[in-house]
Each structure stands twice: as structure tokens, then as C-alpha cells.
Image (tube, rainbow, N blue to C red):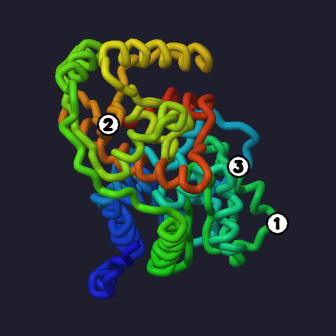
Amino acid sequence: MINRWNEVEAIACKDLVDLRVYTSRLQGVEPDLVLHGGGNTSVKVGDTLYVKGSGWSLDTIERPGFSPVKMDVLLAMAELDHLSDSELVAGQRAALLDEKAPNPSIEAVLHALIPFTFVDHTHADAVATISNTSDGEVRFNEIYGKRVLIVPYVMPGFELAKTIRRMTRDLSWDTIEGLVLLNHGIFTFHADAKASYDKMIELVGMAEAYLEEQTVVPETEDVSAFPQKDAIARQASELLACEVVLKEVRTPYAVALSKIANVGDIVRKGQLTPEHVIRTKPFPVIIDRDPEKAFRRFQKDYSEYFRSHENGEIMLDPCPRYAIIRNHGLIAIGRNEKEAGIIADIIEHTAKAMVQAEQLGGWRSLDEKDVFAIEYWELEQAKLKG
């Protein structure tokens, strides 16, 4: 992981919010840290928390992308026993100091709780990959020792903030350098912008080094052209009632994943990081020879998945967002070029993580009920409408 801090650029920042914009962008440009909206950052200035606003991405964020929220309101929220999603959004919105600002991140309460000026949160691939193994916590203890606090998976938002508040009630924050959220991501924090950013790069770099030592990169292969692309496009177009764009992913890791005999079982064990499900669906369609038959099977499996977990929700379209073509690689399926590109990026990173995790004893992310909760979470689905 490259440290992109530039002292000349940093000095040009006129205040703490400018510095927050600067180091947020340094992280946002790293796909292995922040992939398509994952992660959020904040800075505390007096009694105000400036936190990443909904609809902004860290790689391009500007000052208006940080929502100014009253700290005392957020800390009071953390004291409540229960807070619904609508109450969380409304409460944070009411605490804004600028009515034109975007809705604050759903992690705003957690950012307020962490007692440091700068707080950085990413969904770093290396951290998520290690987390998504059967003994991820053991491996993190081996990598970091007591430098980080390891937090079990909890639904993002208010419940996560409450969990971390409970876990840190008797903890001196100065004794840790970060939080590792299992099956989710990593936080770093400090009074100084550079120190918080440096810590993010260092801790993620340690996870990357561990993976380099413990796993083997698949050999590059000459793979023949994807078969039956027209049939795949036709099936997807019928389900989505529109033309679709297909993007091939043929990296060594993608091809290696498509060659694993039990790949169908592996991809049913969760995403690289939870929010990816709103882009990729909970699992792909797996195609051996007959795309039409494979799509029928996907629709059946998706309907069963929905019925097993629904609680009054309306089922989303039963169309896969990517296909695994046996022995060839992956294909992203999108309604347009932008959507297909986003999905292609996500599944490229996911394929690498899955292959590496399989070498570490087996891929295991979230249970289906937790995946469903994220896929059908109103606050996550709203991101697709932005």
C-alpha cells in the first residue's frame, strides 16, 4: 500500500476541513482501500463533526461533501437503547448546521464516539480478505497483536456504534491504533491528519504483506474467448426489460476462481464487504454449457433465498449481476456502461479475495440472513438511486 502523503500539498490546506478533504482523497484513489463508495471519513472542529455525506465518493469529495453535524446530538443518540433507521436519518438531519448539506453517513454516531480529531474508515481488500476466513480473528491477532481492537460483525449504523461503545467503555483509546471490523473493514484515528492516514496505510500494508507471504498468485493462462455471450445478454435483457452491457473479467484470479470445482458453494458464502451485495446480488449465475438453464436455476435459487429471509419486503428483480463462466472467468452484467463497470471492478477484487481466502483454509464471509439484511436495507438501496 503506497503512502501518497505530500507535504507541499498538505501545507496548502487552509484548515482542518481542507486537510480532511485531502487525506480522504488520498484514500479514495486506492481501489484496494475504497472501492465504489466504501468507507467514510470525518474531522471534529470544536463541537461540530464534519463527516462524509451520502452520495459523495472519497476519491472526488470536496468540502460540500462533508456534512457538519452537532456533536452533542450524535453523542446523545449513542445513549439511546434503540433507534430505527428512519429515526437515525431524521435525527442526524435535524442536527445539521447547514440545511443544504447532504445526509450524514450512517456511521456518523460512531465517528462522534471515537475521541480523536480525525477518523478514517475503509473497506480495505486485504483486511476484508483475512477477515473472511474461518479463523480471521486468530490471523489478525497474529498480524497486529494488541495494536487494534477486533469487533465482531454487527449491522452497520446505530447497532455498530452501540456495540463499539459497549466494547470500549473501559478501554483507554490511546492503547489502540485502530479497529478491525470483522467482515466489514478497518478504522484508524488520531489528533493529526497525517498520523491517522499513515496508520491506515501501515495497518493495511501489514495485512497485504501477510497475504503475500501466505498465498500464491495463480499463473496467467491463455483462455479462449467467452462462449455464449449473446445468450447471456439475451437472458439478462429479458429479466431486466432493457438492453444490458457485459464486461469480461479475465484476470488470473478470476480464471482461477472459475476453475474451482465447488465455486458454487464458495460464492454463496458472502461478499468481500457487505454493501457490495446491492451491486452484485448475493451470488452469481454459474454457467457450464447452457445459459438458459443456468439463468432458470439462478431465478429459482434467488426466489428461495428471498422466501427464506423476507419479512414483508418486496422481492427485487431475479436477475444475476455477474456470471461465472466455468474455466473462463467472470462477466459483469449491467444496465449501462457505468453499472457494468462498477460490477466488473467489484467482482475482480472479490475473485482475488476468494482465491486467497481459499488458500488460507476457506472463504467465509456473512451468513445469508446478514447478506439479505444488507441487500434489502432501505438505506443501502437508496445508494443505487443517487
What amino acid type is highlighted by mark number 3? Answer: Lys
Depth order, front residue of 183/349: 349
Q: Which of disc 2 and disc 3 is earlier in sequence? A: 3
Give the residue number, with chain letter if any, for mark 1. Answer: 170
Element class at badge 3: helix
Q: Mark 3 points at which residue?
A: 162
- What's the residue type where badge 1 is placed? Asp
Q: Nearer the viewer, residue 104 or 201?
A: 201
Q: Residue at x 35, y 33 (%)?
A: 326
Q: Position of residue 290 (x, y in %)?
A: 31, 17
Question: For the residue labelled by badge 1, is the local secondary structure a helix, a strand or a loop?
Answer: loop
CA gap, disc 3 to disc 2?
28 Å
Where disc 2 sits, the SS reads loop
Q: Residues within 10 Å of mark 2 (few under 14, many from 20)?
A: few
Question: How far is mark 3 from mark 1, CA to CA?
Answer: 14 Å
- Where residue 104 appears, as percent x and y from the top left, is 46, 48
To which quarter of the image does residue 9 belong? bottom left
Q: What residue type is labelled 2?
A: Gly
Which residue shows up at 47% across the image and 78% down it? Answer: 198
